[in-house]
Image (tube, rainbow, N blue to C red):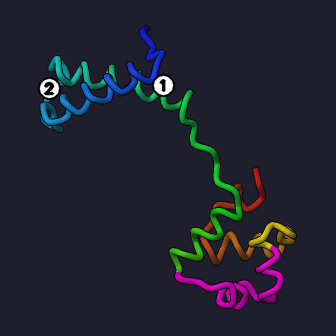
């Protein structure tokens, strides 16, 4: 199968996808030329992006900071929620120390963070 091999080809393919998007919708028949072309080009773009723009798994620190933002938590509020000292939270957020297994469980439960991320799996 064909492959996108350059950034120029990637951008041209993206432009063509933008042209095709208004031409198809959920009711477009599966044998429609525009839909078939859109699907093929989308797969090529997905392969190119996977190779050239990989999405890394976020670190625990990144996820905690995001959750703090989403839940409007300060370091003090987080320390109360997890029942640890504010200085310990500061150490976690600065990367100076890692949570114990007990605290990791609390982080997973109370911040709704996947246990794989908390455990670094």
Query: Looking at the image, is mark 1 or mark 2 earlier in the sequence?
Result: 2
79 horizontally vs 30: left or right: right
Residue pictured at 68% horizontal, 69% vertical: 108
Q: Is residue 121 above or below residue 85?
A: above
Q: Is residue 102 above or below residue 87?
A: above
Q: CA gap, disc 1 to disc 2?
A: 25 Å
Q: Is residue 36 above or below residue 87?
A: above
**Residue 29, numbered label:** 2
Element type at mark 2: loop
Q: Is residue 79 magenta?
A: yes
How crowded is the residue under tag 2: few (<14 C-alpha within 10 Å), some, or many (20+)? few
95 horizontally vs 77: left or right: right
Residue 93 spot, x, y in % from top left: 74, 72
Mark closer to the observer (1, 2)? 1
* Residue that label 1 marks: 47
Residue 97 quadrant: bottom right
First to last magenta residue range: 72-91
């Amino acid at each position: 199968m064909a492959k996108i091999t350059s950034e120029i080809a990637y951008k041209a393919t993206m432009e063509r996808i933008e042209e095709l998007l208004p031409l198809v919708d959920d009711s477009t028949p599966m044998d429609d030329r525009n839909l078939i072309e859109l699907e093929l080009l989308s797969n090529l773009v997905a392969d190119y992006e996977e190779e050239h723009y990989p999405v890394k798994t976020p670190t625990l620190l990144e996820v905690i900071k995001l959750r703090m933002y989403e839940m409007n938590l300060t370091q003090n509020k987080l320390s109360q929620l997890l029942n640890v000292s504010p200085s310990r939270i500061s150490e976690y957020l600065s990367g100076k120390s890692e949570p114990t297994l007990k605290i990791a469980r609390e982080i997973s439960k109370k911040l709704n963070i996947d246990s794989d991320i908390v455990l670094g799996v």
